[in-house]
Image: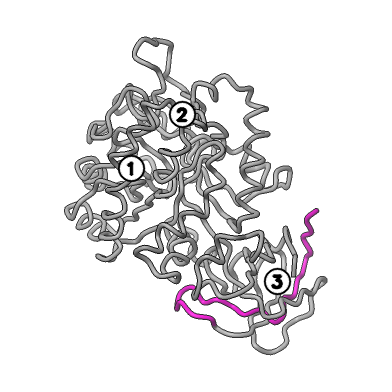
Amino acid sequence: MTHKPKTLTLTNANVLDVRRGEIAGSRNLFIENGRIREISPSPVSEGDVLIDLNGATLMPGLCDAHVHVVAATASFPDLMRWSPMYVTARAGQILSGMLMRGFTTVRDCGGADFGLAQSVEEGYLIGPRLLFSGHAISQTGGHADMREKGEHWESCTCCAGLGRIADGVPEMRKACREELRQGAHFIKIMASGGVASPTDRIGNTQFAREEIIAAVEEAEAAETYVAAHVYTARAANRALECGVKSIEHGNLIDDTTIDLLLEKDAFLVPTMSTHEVLGAEGVAGGMPKHMCDKVIEVAEAGHKTHAHAHARGVKMVFGTDLLGPMHRHQLLEFKIRSAFQTPAEIIRSATLTAAELFQMEGELGEITIGARADLIGVEGNPLDDIGILQDPDRFLKFICKDGEIFKNAL
């Protein structure tokens, strides 16, 4: 049972300043209509509900910038055959699991739509705030074309619930406009080969430059941006040169790509956890073995590539890209990234930097006056031990989204 008071006062909160990467000390917060109105070491206004955090660390709710909440199975042929109502029920379970891990905003990179986001916003489903691209846009034979070599059914609209096909500039413009018409927060394109698609190779580049530029122009016209699925430097460089703002995965990029990411002030969203677990659990989760085998060539490379990109100052955002039963590994990303990022840097990637990518600075990712009251309270200091964020059953005591209380175990 959740509760959204009109006004809420939180006392004795040990506030984590994600911008400075330090504990700011004991603070009291006053929240009104889902927004933070007062923050002070002194007493603040008294709300309808008062909660004493008893010194728990209070930090912004976490963001995951690459999820697929309708992918309740890693078998896309099965997903195509499921009833939309069944897909929604399974998505609801995935969403609630994410919220209970401390994620108050997620960005869906293919599959979710306005109806799912609206259901969460209105409280019919329990989950994080859902930003979505609608269908990811793919060329014929690209990463969202799920037909095997011998299958020839029409694929111009939607494949496996996650993608749609567009070939040529007019089709690309129409596909982008259609997703934006239906409320998409950004455009997602498949600009290279991938693991979960049957007929393309990891090293493929996809879409002609003029098609990518058309997508960027349509996104910019709607005051948003394009995210691109890519693995190699060749594919990532083409995307960045055409104006793509968010590079998804990027395990095989090199210094030429890093130069462009810095020059263009673009973002990198590694999804290291999915590459970590697909090899071990992909087949059990429903993905054919020959697809899971493709992950081997990108998984190890990602550890070196992303560490190097971080060292050079690339803006890196937290993302996971998990499928089916593997969603339970969402917090593994913290552990993997701790090999090359400090706890403060990892937390920043899941808060402040994510908010910047989402074009929601001042709204999300920071405990500041005027921001949405997306807050989590944990026992202990995650700046000293990032493992605290990986064990929510033990350490996550308080979850609040837009001023609505979803967990209070203080």
Q: Quadrant of the C terminus?
A: bottom right
Where residue 258 appears, as percent x and y from the top left, is 23, 56
Where residue 314 appears, as percent x and y from the top left, is 30, 61
SS under mark 1: helix
- 37 is higher (above) or lower (below) than 408: below
Query: Which of the 4 quarters of the picture holds residue 304?
Result: bottom left
Q: Which residues are magenta?
A: 1-23
Q: Are marks 2 and 1 in contact (CB under 8 Å)?
A: no
Q: Name the residue beneath numbered marker 3.
A: 31
Q: Nearer the viewer, residue 281 or 14?
A: 281
Q: Nearer the viewer, residue 359 or 74?
A: 74
Residue found at x 70% / y 47%: 126
Q: Of label 2 and label 3, which has the lower sequence position?
A: 3
Q: Are marks 2 and 3 in contact (CB under 8 Å)?
A: no
Is residue 218 magenta-colored?
Answer: no
Where residue 211 appears, as percent x and y from the top left, is 28, 33
Is residue 14 magenta-colored?
Answer: yes
Q: Which callout, 2 or 1, points to the residue nearer the camera?
A: 2
Q: State left or right for residue 410 relative to residue 206.
A: right
Local packing at callout 1 (Cα closer than 10 Å; few below 14, some 14-19, many 20+) is many
Q: State left or right for residue 275 relative to residue 115.
A: left
Q: Name the residue beneath numbered marker 1.
A: 216
Q: Residue furthest left?
A: 256
Q: Name the residue beneath numbered marker 2.
A: 287
Query: Which of the 4 quarters of the picture holds residue 315?
Result: bottom left
Local packing at callout 3 (Cα closer than 10 Å; few below 14, some 14-19, many 20+) is many
Q: Amino acid at mark 1?
A: Val
Q: Which callout, 1 or 3, points to the residue nearer the camera?
A: 3
Q: Amino acid at mark 3?
A: Ile
Q: Nearer the viewer, residue 344 or 61?
A: 344
Q: CA distance from mark 1 to mark 3?
A: 38 Å
